[in-house]
Image (spheres, rainbow, N blue to C red):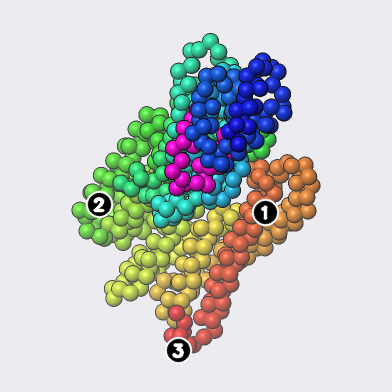
Amino acid sequence: MAVEELQSIIKRCQILEEQDFKEEDFGLFQLAGQRCIDEGHIEQLLEIIQNEKNKVIINNMGWNLVGPVVRCLLWNKEDEKRKHYFLMLDLLVKLCNPKELLLGLLELIEEPSGKQISQIILLLLQPLQTVIQKLRNNKAYSVGLALSTLWSQLSLLPVPYSKEQIQTDDYGLCQCCKALIEFTKPFVEEVINNKENSVESENEKLKDELLKFCFKSLKCPLLTAQFFEQSKEAGNDPLRCFASEIIGFLSAIGHPFPKMIVNHGRKKKTWDYLEFEEEEDKQLADSMASLAYLVFVQGISIDQLPMVLRTEESVFSKGVDLLENGLLRIEDNSLLHQYLEIKSFLTVPQGLVKVMTLCPIETLRKKSLAMLQLYINKLDSQGKYTLFRCLLNTSNHSGVEAFIIQNIKNQIDVSLKKTHDNKWFTGPQLISLLDLVLFLPEGAETDLLQNSDRIMASLNLLRYLVIKDNEKDNQTGLWTELGKIENNFLKPLHTGLNMSKAHYEAEIKNSQENSQDVQKSKDLCSVTVGGEEIPNMPPEMQLKVLHSALFTFDLIESVLARVEELIEIKTKSTPEENIGIK
């Protein structure tokens, strides 16, 4: 009955001109065609679609059958007629109006939720690619619309976190990322091949749509994605492969990573023809951060970096490896301090500090830190003492200074445990070194947040000294210098903490009061801290930054209170009571 009804509709439409088709004809064709599918008359329907006499009708009306066919493919996964459904889908894609098909396919992709998102995307990516390639006009717009729709749906899927989740890929995100690359490749190749084409504006528009897609992909899923370690397994990491392909697309369409970084740093962007919507522009910083992480930390496509930069990093890496090879041949504590009088011996640790603090490659920074520790271990006591003084005076980096202070603490601990006296980390020599540690460079006005690593390390050192060295023994000389330490370090630190906390609490109050107005205006706000303006960011992000600063001050204040409590106990207690303090 359904087949006869469809044939009747087709017979009536065959005598009409294309422009005379009515909306009622489209509706009747869709209803009859869907009934044929529901009742299983697939072979008869295929004959109707393939009949040359029905070519014009199928071109105009056939796209209405795509939805029912796709739903059959999704629901009837074990159906023996699946090959007929696939054949019908292929024929409809080949014969129907591509413009109508494009909209129909995108509507189908937008329908599902949960695990069905990946199922329908994987099913329709190939047909969607074919349809877009058939379009003669506005291809850039169609590619952009398709990529935006696909990305919007994929962004709803949870990003797998563990290696097991990546391998099981329950929601199909990893499969979709791989398929999406294959979907996009022909359009990237089209941009490359048409660089000299006379239709320059259309090619530029296509390039911009691809650039938008790459930016979106860098933010989701790549910003939150976890990656396998750089090893043999890395090649089997689908998200890592996706990242590599996205960065490759950027380079292919004329936006290699180095150019992107330089461009992003400018006040005025130079994306040709590309005008990001307001919300997209706000997301650009996240995308650029993700890109930098992928290249510098994960090492993906790092060969795109300029040869000069890569040559320098290669030299640094070889230099660090050579230093390690040499140091491992030397016994600990055997490198005489006199060697530090040779300029090249002192420039080695200073060079390591520069690599630790300035090199963009994380593995090289970590290796340099390990080599600095190895270098310190090889020096004799006086050499360590000399190097510590030098680096405390020259590093100008709170994290490096904290590292040195921790090493000073370790050497004091060794000295106190030895039976023979070590004059460099006890008594007057140690006091001279502590003068560089237990003080605030600018008194109470010191930027406590900027120097928080150094301050915490200094407090922990002082706490250790108070616990380990009794006032009666005074091996370190701490107790004779306690008054100076309180005046130069503890009291200014108290004052600085009170000032800093008051300032940040006021900023939090102001930020909270202004947040509603800011949200209404959909604008970014700024906050001035320590005389410098925090870069523009959403109010909720600024509040997080301000609360994080207060947490740091509370932590410093807690350790400071404990140090002062221990000093009070030690100065008032008897030697017997001191035994219980650990």
Taking the image as shown, residue 204 lies to the left or right of residue 414, namely: right
Q: Report which quarter residue 342 is drawn in.
A: top left
**Residue 194 location in percent, x, y?**
48, 16
Q: Is residue 268 visible?
A: no
The residue positioned farthest toward the bottom in the image shown: 576
Q: Which quadrant, please, contains the N terminus?
A: top right
Residue carrying label 1: 543
Q: Which quadrant, please, contains the C terminus?
A: bottom left
Seen in the picture, residue 398 relative to 312 is either above or below; the reply is below
Residue carrying label 2: 327
Marks 2 and 3: CB-CB under 8 Å?
no
Taking the image as shown, residue 514 lies to the left or right of residue 226, namely: right
Q: Foreground: 23 or 312?
A: 23
Amino acid identity at mark 3: Glu
Q: Which of marks 3 and 1 is nearer the N terminus?
A: 1
For label 2, the crowd category at 10 Å Cα-Cα, with few meaning under 14, some 14 to 19 and many 20 or more, is: some
Residue at 69 percent of width and 21 percent of height: 21
2 or 3: mark nearer the eye = 2
1 or 2: mark nearer the eye = 1
Residue carrying label 3: 576
Amino acid identity at mark 2: Leu
**How far apart in space, not on screen, are marks 3 and 1 (Cα)?**
49 Å
Residue at 52 percent of width and 22 percent of height: 51
Please state the extent of the stretch shown in magenta in the rendering. Answer: 64-91
Residue at 46 percent of width and 58 percent of height: 402
Where disc 2 sits, the SS reads: helix
